[in-house]
Image: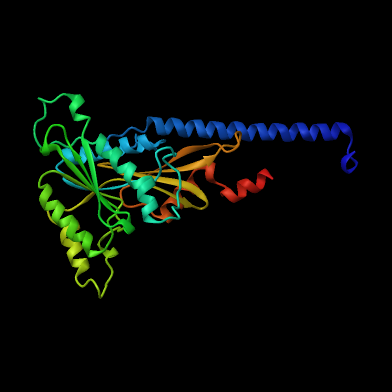
């Protein structure tokens, strides 16, 4: 017998251990079910609590398109969209590194995402009641490379309804002053029509650090991108990142608050995971905020490393 115990004692201990394990499983299931119910019932139209993590490439594009259209309806003619950069066959929450750099990133993600978005978005500047829905869904797409080594390009959706509903999108602009000139020139040409910036490399005007080769770059960026009636507004962002070893997702869809989520590996099915709503915030989410929200969730009381260790 193990450690001098009788067979009956061993069986009792095994039974107790099994009961305790079953109890923990049921508690975890109840906590998960309760959390899912809370998420499902969180449908405040003012905060965007009903927003969910997109699952597929198409889900993300549609979520972005509706955000762009809501902003356009509110008069936002200059918008910034930041996708999680994935390929057409990948999960919307895939984390890619693109070892080939911006050229590969554009070819495999930036270009297909932009084209899909331009097929989806409707942004008329005139009354289009005389045109059928079928015509509205078939724009002619064109693209032109800007700097090949940067993977940057400008895409145009020529609407079947006519030029008044055309949309343009500049993909992967960076802080080089060339892009400021391109944006300024294109913005003036587009007038009241919609112009999008897709995954620009900057975060805000402070991204234009002092550069002796580009004197006045920050001031120029402020004027072209961040101020005036043609200032670009962030209308859709989806970020996938890691905090405390946990896979997290943040979604900002105009005009709603940031919606914050984390993925928890399934204890019962290998290589499966489920999403848990952490909360929301008005300002850009920080690691400290996400950490605090994770610590509040019963599913994340233990770190990922601790959970994996317990399974050994």
Q: Nearer the viewer, residue 144 or 247?
A: 144
What x and y, as percent, mark residue 291?
46, 52
Give the colour scheme of this rendering.
Answer: rainbow
- In the figure, residue 173 lies in which quadrant? bottom left
Residue 14, located in which quarter of the rendered image? top right
Considering depth in this image, is 227 or 157 the residue closer to the camera? Answer: 157
Residue at 55% over, 36% down: 272
Residue occupying the point 57% across, 37% down? 266
Q: Is residue 25 visible?
A: yes
The x and y percentages for residue 106 are 35, 50
In the image, is 197 to the left or to the right of 185?
Answer: right
Quadrant for the C terminus in the image: top right
Residue shown at the point (60%, 50%) measured from the top left: 305
In the picture, the quarter occupied by the N terminus is top right
State whether residue 238 appears in this view: no
Q: Residue 273: x, y in percent?
A: 53, 38
Q: Position of residue 259 (x, y in %)?
A: 36, 43
């Amino acid at each position: 017998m193990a450690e001098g115990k009788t067979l009956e004692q061993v069986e009792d201990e095994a039974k107790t251990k099994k009961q305790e394990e079953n109890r923990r499983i049921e508690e975890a299931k109840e906590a998960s079910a309760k959390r899912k119910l809370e998420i499902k019932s969180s449908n405040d139209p003012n905060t965007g609590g009903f927003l969910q993590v997109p699952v597929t490439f198409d889900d993300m594009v549609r979520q972005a398109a509706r955000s762009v259209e809501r902003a356009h309806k509110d008069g936002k003619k200059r918008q910034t969209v930041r996708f999680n950069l994935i390929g057409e066959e990948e999960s919307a929450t895939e984390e890619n590194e693109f070892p080939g750099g911006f050229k590969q990133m554009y070819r495999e993600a930036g270009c297909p995402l932009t084209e899909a978005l331009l097929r989806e978005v409707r942004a008329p500047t005139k009354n289009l009641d005389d045109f059928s829905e079928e015509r509205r869904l078939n724009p002619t797409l064109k693209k032109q490379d800007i700097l090949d080594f940067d993977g940057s390009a400008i895409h145009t959706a020529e609407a079947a309804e006519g030029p008044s509903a055309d949309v343009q999108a500049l993909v992967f602009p960076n802080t080089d002053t060339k892009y400021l000139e391109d944006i300024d020139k294109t913005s003036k040409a587009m007038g009241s029509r919609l112009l999008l910036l897709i995954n620009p490399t900057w975060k805000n005007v402070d991204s234009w650090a002092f550069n002796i080769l580009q004197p006045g770059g920050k001031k120029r960026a402020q004027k072209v991108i961040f101020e005036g009636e043609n200032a670009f507004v962030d209308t859709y962002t989806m970020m996938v990142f890691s905090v405390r070893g946990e896979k997290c997702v943040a979604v900002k869809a105009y005009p709603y608050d940031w919606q914050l989520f984390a993925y928890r590996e399934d204890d019962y099915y290998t290589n499966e995971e489920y999403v848990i709503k952490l909360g929301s915030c008005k300002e850009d989410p920080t690691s400290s905020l996400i950490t605090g929200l994770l610590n509040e969730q019963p599913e994340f009381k233990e770190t990922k490393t601790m959970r994996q260790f317990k399974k050994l």
